[in-house]
Image (cartoon, rainbow, N blue to C red):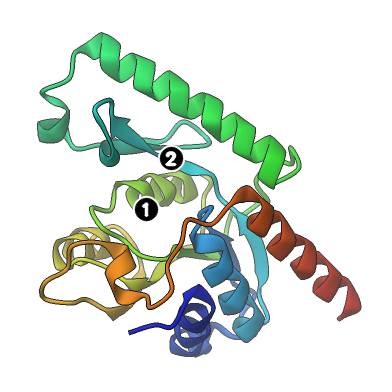
């Protein structure tokens, strides 16, 4: 359905064209959401930054998770999914992800605080939503920071996640929701795990473009 994240981001930006010139703020979730957010922000002529949120993975299956935590400490947990884990195990996983959040803030955002979003229209962007815990923790952060309007925008999402997240945001834009949805990667012809280096290159390119405007 999409050639790569750049293609998906350009198409997503077009779907969000109503927000062009409105002062909306694009917040991309690293790492896969950053190429998407870059293209969306370019199309909308919007500000761009990174919001650091991490999945809480199962210790024996890191590709799957029982919740997520955002950089301000906002947490979303699927209680039923977490029942099989001991409280000490959950505590240890949270601590590990807080450490990774701090690392990413330092490495990917240069140690800078999240920009002020109080009263702003915020567009939360990722390369897709499977279960939705990471996005829900990100939404919670934006609400805690007093965002004026919260829009979630992704190229692909599962139907259950769409139903649940639409109930907690002002608008949700999803380009594709395949009936046999198994993983975000299935809608991309070229898929790979985005490295830190690429995120830094994208944000450096954004800063150069922003200064040239």
Q: CA distance from mark 2 to mark 1?
A: 9 Å
**Residue lying at 43% horizontally and 83% vertically, measured from the top left:** 3
Seen in the picture, residue 49 relative to 64 is either above or below; the reply is below
Q: Position of residue 157 (x, y in %)?
A: 26, 68
Q: Which mark is first along the chain, 1 or 2?
A: 2
Query: Under tag 2, what secondary structure?
Result: strand
* Picture residue at 59% right of the left edge, 86% below the top: 20
Relative to 82, 46 lies left or right: right
Image quarter for residue 62?
A: top left
- 180 sits to left or right of 120: left
SS class, disc 1? helix
The N terminus, quarter of image? bottom left
Q: Position of residue 8 (x, y in %)?
A: 45, 80
Q: Which residue is mark 1?
A: 135
Which quadrant does the C terminus fall into?
A: bottom right
Place of residue 161 in the rendered image (x, y in percent of width and height, measured from the top left): 21, 60
Question: How packed is label 1: few (under 14 Cα within 10 Å), some, or many (20 or more)?
Answer: many
Direction top: furthest residue: 88
Mark 2 in CB contact with mark 1 (< 8 angstroms) = no
Look at the image and tell me whether residue 89 can be seen. yes
- In the image, which disc is placed on residue 11? none
Left-right relation of 203 to 177: right
At 54% from the left and 78% from the top, the residue drawn is 6
Q: Is residue 181 above or below residue 75?
A: below
Residue 113 visible in this rendered orientation of the protein: no
Q: Judge left or right: residue 21 versus residue 101.
A: right
Residue at point 71% right, 55% down? 200
Q: Nearer the viewer, mark 2 or mark 1?
A: 2
Pick the front one: 62 or 130: 62
Question: Looking at this view, is 144 or 88 the one in front?
Answer: 88
What residue is shown with label 2?
54
Could you classify mark 2 by the number of other residues whose Cα lies within 10 Å: few (under 14), some (14-19), or many (20 or more)?
many
């Amino acid at each position: 359905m999409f050639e790569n994240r750049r293609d998906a981001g350009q198409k997503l930006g077009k779907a969000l064209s109503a927000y062009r010139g409105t002062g909306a703020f694009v917040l991309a979730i690293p790492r896969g959401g950053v190429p998407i957010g870059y293209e969306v922000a370019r199309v909308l002529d919007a500000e761009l930054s990174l919001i650091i949120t991490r999945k809480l993975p199962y210790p024996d299956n890191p590709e799957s998770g029982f919740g997520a935590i955002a950089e301000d400490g906002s947490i979303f947990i699927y209680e039923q999914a977490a029942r099989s884990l001991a409280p000490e195990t959950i505590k240890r996983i949270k601590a590990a992800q807080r450490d990774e959040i701090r690392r990413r803030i330092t490495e990917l955002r240069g140690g800078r605080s999240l920009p002020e979003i109080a009263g702003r229209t915020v567009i939360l962007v990722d390369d897709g939503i499977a279960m939705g815990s990471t996005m829900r923790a990100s939404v919670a952060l934006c609400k805690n920071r007093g965002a004026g309007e919260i829009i979630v925008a992704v190229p692909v999402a599962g139907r259950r996640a769409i139903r649940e997240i639409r109930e907690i945001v002002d608008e949700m834009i999803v380009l594709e929701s395949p009936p046999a949805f198994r993983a975000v990667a299935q809608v991309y012809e070229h898929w790979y795990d985005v490295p830190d280096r690429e995120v830094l290159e994208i944000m450096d390119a954004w800063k150069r473009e922003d200064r040239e405007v």
